[in-house]
Image (cartoon, helix red, strand yellow):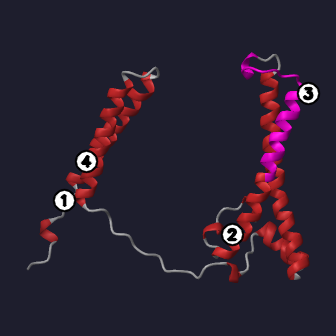
Amino acid sequence: MKFLPFNTDPTVQLRWRYHCRLGGLNLLCIVLGAGIGGYIGSWLAALLQLGDGPLRDQPHGLLWAVLFFFGFSMSVLVCHLLSFVLMAVTLHWSYGWSWERIRELMFESHIPPHWLKPARPPVAKPPPARWQQITASLLMILFGAVMLVMGQKLPNKILHLVGGVMAISLGIHALFKAVRNRPNLSTRPAK
């Protein structure tokens, strides 16, 4: 059982008009939640008597940050769930859906078949050509070398050095794999 507000599987399969309707309502409610979250932040700043200046210099700055993050997150989450309540009420009053059918849609993700795109057969993608594999691995090696050179000049050197070494080693591994996987000449059909 997948709760529809947190189910991301069918969103790619929905027809465009249903995707826009559900997404538009959802986005509108999330923006409303973000606005409420901003109001919560200014209300908390007034309540904790925060002045001008950086937050880390304020006496209750950390408390404000924690409460603001919690309040902002909760207001966005509540408004996200509110969008599905509004959708349920709209489906019931405007389209005559039964509450049982709405419950199946919301709590079990039983999406009506006419909301989904027609199924297409999967397309087999050919593997990349050998020259593409070699080019990609050489670019990865070049990227790793650039990270190593740039890492010497930045304050967090160790991160760039480790990333550069990893990129170079992955690039060398991919290069050897691309070069080693040559077509077997003995299995080619005769001309």
Which mark's residue is nearer the viewer, 1 or 4? 4
Q: For the residues labelled 2 and 4, say whether their Cβ atoms are less than 8 Å apart.
A: no
Q: Can residue 23 be seen?
A: yes
For the magenta stretch, what is the residue range?
Answer: 32-57
Residue behind mark 4: 175
| Element carrying mark 2 | helix
**Does the magenta portion include 2?**
no
Q: State which quadrant residue 86 falls in.
A: bottom right
Q: What residue type is labelled 4?
A: Leu
Find residue 80 and report its horizontal and vertical position in percent.
79, 56
Q: Dominant secondary structure of the magenta stretch?
A: helix
Q: Residue 47 carries which label?
A: 3
Q: Name the N-terminal-most of marks 1 and 4.
A: 4
Q: What residue type is labelled 3?
A: Leu
| Element carrying mark 1 | loop
Q: Which amino acid does label 1 sit on?
A: Arg
Residue behind mark 1: 182
Residue behind mark 2: 20
Identify the residue at horizontal 69%, vertical 82% (top origin): 113
Find residue 10 and report its horizontal and vertical position in percent.
65, 69
Q: Which amino acid does label 2 sit on?
A: Cys
| Element carrying mark 3 | helix
Q: For the residues labelled 3 and 1, say whether their Cβ atoms are less than 8 Å apart.
A: no
Count all numbered tags in the image, as a single digit: 4
